[in-house]
Image: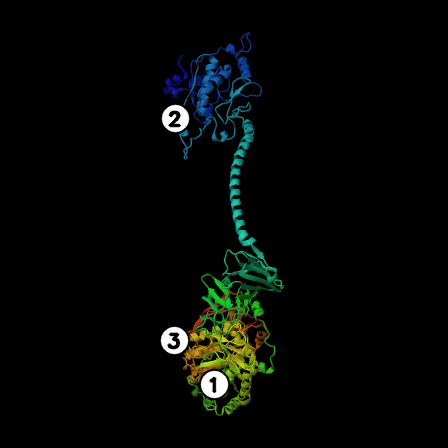
Amino acid sequence: MSQTPLRAAQALNGQAQALPYADEQDEAVAEEEEEEAQAKLLPVRKQSLGQRRNVELPHLLVLNERPVEPEMCSLNSGTPTPPAERERERERDHFGPGLRRNSISLPQGINSLDLEALRLRHQMQAQEALHEESQTESMVDDASASSMGTPTTIMVIPKANDNAKQEDDDSSDEFGNAKKPVHRDRFRSRRRASIAPLPALRLNSKEMLASDFDTHSLASNQASITSVNSLASLLREKMQAFPQLIRKKKRETKDYKIKIFVIIMFFIIIFLIGYAYIAYHHQVLTRSYFQKIKFNSKDRIFRILSHEDKEVISGHLGVTLDSDTAPFHCLENHRRSDGSVCIEWNGIARLHLNFEDKQVFRCYTLQWQALRPGLLPTDCYELKRDNGLWFGGGITKGQEWSLSYANFDFMPYASGDHKVHQFGNAVKRYFINSIGVAMQVSERTPLQLGINRTENQFCLRAANDDFTFVNRLTPLPQLDYKICTTEDMRSLHMLMTQQSLWDGLTEQDIAELHSLLEEPVWRIPNQAQRDNLNESIICDYSENAIAMGLGHIVINEFWQENIGDFTVDRVRFPTLKDTIDVLHRRGFKVVFTIQPFISTDSPNFKDAVARKLLIYERYSERSIPALTRYKSSSSAGVLDITNNASVPWLLEKLQRLKDEYGVKSFYLDLGTGYNLPHYYQCRQPLDNPDMYARMLTSSLESAGLMAVSTASVVPKPPTFLSTPPANATWEGLRDTLAAVLNYGVIGYPFVLAGAIGGDYLLQRPLTKMVSFYSLAQPPLPDAELFIRWLQLATFLPAMQFSHLPDEYHSELVTRVAQELKEVRQTVVIALLKKYLSPSMNEGLPLVRPLWMLDPHDPACLIVSDEFSVGEELIVAPILDAGLEEREVYLPQGVWKDGIDGSLRKGSRWMHGYRVPKDKIAYFRKMPDNTRF
């Protein structure tokens, strides 16, 4: 047949559906063979491979095939061989040792295939990526043509949708790259194609031909298609192919893992570089000094750690220093021999750090020294941390319960009028945080205090000025303070405030102290004019006060004609000595109010100027006294306490009063630091204005002081500290409680609250200090305000009256006063005496905020309108008008209600607790084993 294979295929394309498969015959021949097999009792031919695999196989067309004579297949040229023998010989020739029959039917005469010619022909043709069907077509076509000598062609005719598949395979991927051709084997399922190799074609007894175009095939004598009936052969093939697949997967997995490993290592290196940079600037440069303290000298971050190495507090030291200034260790001549660490910023500032171990307490001393003018050493610490609150410093202008709620710029830390100045009449350079940190600043530091709630900073600064710290104790400002830490806030407070107040006390002093706790203080009402006070007013007032009990009768400064006379005005008090004797027989103790101020109208002013006993003007000769204003005196000089002659001169006059009139003690009205002349100058420099009050109080202890109006250190008992004068309003009532609690926190255990009902009445805000005015007694306050004030004062260390309950002519007021008197005598006084010794020994106040009972209870830290007497009595007063109920919180324990006698469990809130007008909420602690 002269027609080429391609043309023959085109001609027969229309009859493709009628052509047989390569491994099967047509139906007629199949039927005939089946009949012959049955006749000869031979086995029936099995189904074709396509039928068994349920796949569509390409059709085969054999063109110009020449039949082969049976004799040509025989190996012997002699007599004809029987058919059965010829069949056995044919099987033996085609299937040598070690090979088994394949399930693929091959054209006859394939043994004479010229393999070399096939390869040369294939190499000479331009090849493209072919599919497996096209490869099989070309190979079978060439084999048939070479073996028969005539153009015999076996055509593989694709299905109609093969062109579409070809187009899809040749298309590009989503990135525009040409896809690689996909070769599929129709003889194998998807599962077997992933495991077993492709079949090899049997060429003769010695050679096997695999598809050269199939990259997934392996030309091996062991690669053959398994028989469907041989399960063992299938498993063997899988086992043979498994190592090769494993090696291939390992190579692919290895490449994939290497890429991931490189990426991970890249990010790890980047992270380590960043971490090393941060650690270098924040950790490596942070050095541990002493124990549990770390300081980064570059950024000046100061951290204190607890016993468990947990950060307790952190601060930023040297805030005013340049951030780019590098520190270095001090030179040898600037170091100290006390073991402190010295760090210096060249020509700017020098810092000394020291450590003091007190067993469970650790204290660190920090001292900044400025080295150039204009530098103000400033350290800032966290204002709030882990719900911790700062307390101490006394009362502030806004009367905040805690310093953590305040907000003000840097102000000199000195006593003043809290209505006008930032701080109140009593100060102490002591601050404590509920997390277990306390600070104590040196008295020689020109301290300025600033609180910034926005930036969460509590700051200390050393800065001189023209009044408060005008006496520069060092050429440049110096900030010196101590920080102590421990696990228990209460123990820390005891450590910082501990001082034995028993030293030097006599039996008379202890008796006087008990008298102030047990008996009220009766203050003769202030008069608007000096002439309105006389002996009859004093006698009448004492007779009315007897009904409420005996006590101390305090006569204001009007007992003398002018402030500073230190002699009784005989015009208004001609028989004062007899009057005082009567009061003594009644059981009262008379107290005179004295001041260090000497009016220019007093005869003593001239004498003091001549003796140079007064503070003089700065930058002037010592003969010119500095003047100030105080209460009823518009012009007065001030005794120079640093002059060795001033104290004896004053003590002599006071002793004369005691001898002549039988006065037992004095009330020292010092004013505040701001009552000193603005341009004051003492013979010896004062560290600060409050040092004046401290020195004068200490000098007059021998004269007998019942109370002082201002203080910067705890006065020696039995001397009490008075709270600031209170306005006769509900706000004044709240200010009184806040003052008592805050003064107790900073270490003043004995506090004398103002008069019940208020000390004065002003409906407008003050622009000047109260001490600039001579204010009269306020009018009789509202009955409700007086009752609530009286209820609060009943549980305070001392009670002070100005208005008497009888003045109301009210049965309710009189009954409430009598009931409260009984409560104080039966309940309160016993507790005050019980906790007197711990207060004297440990510095703990008699009246305490709740956090001193349980510093670890967050609720106790925020409660500002309750307090405890010792550790056994909780008081919750009403501090607002018209209220008869309130919220009450009780610390842990079992408490007995003072109103109805019921038992209450602690560590919880009581909401809407009823408090009638004639009652006050108080609770007594019961033993721990008490059951409901």
Residue 876 visible to an observer of this rendering: no
Of residue 246 and residue 664, the one placed in the foreground of this image is 664
Residue most toward the top? 78
Crowding near the residue tagged with mark 3, few <14, some 14–19, many ≥20 C-alpha atoms within 10 Å:
few
Mark 1 Cα shell of 10 Å, populated few (<14), some (14-19), many (≥20) = some
Q: Amino acid at mark 3?
A: Arg
Q: Nearer the viewer, mark 1 or mark 2?
A: 1
The chosen color scheme is rainbow
Q: Which numbered dot is residue 647?
A: none
Left or right: 177 with respect to 746? left
Q: Position of residue 730 (x, y in %)?
A: 42, 75
The quadrant in which the N terminus is found is top left
Q: CA distance from mark 2 to mark 3?
A: 103 Å
| Mark 2 residue element | helix
Left or right relative to 548: residue 500: right
Q: Could you tell me how far apart the alpha carbons at marks 3 and 1 are, in whole angstroms? A: 33 Å
Which residue is identified by label 1?
A: 602
Task: Give the vertical position of 470 relative to 177 (above or below).
Answer: below
Q: Secondary structure at mark 3?
A: loop
* Rendering coords of residue 366 (x, y %): 56, 64
> Which residue is disc 2 drawn over?
163
Determine which quarter of the picture holds residue 835: bottom right
Q: Is residue 651 above or below residue 176?
A: below
Residue 347 visible, this angle: yes
Q: Which residue is mark 3?
A: 764
Question: In this rendering, which labeled residue sits more in front, label 3 or label 1?
Answer: 1
Looking at the image, is mark 2 or mark 3 nearer the viewer?
3
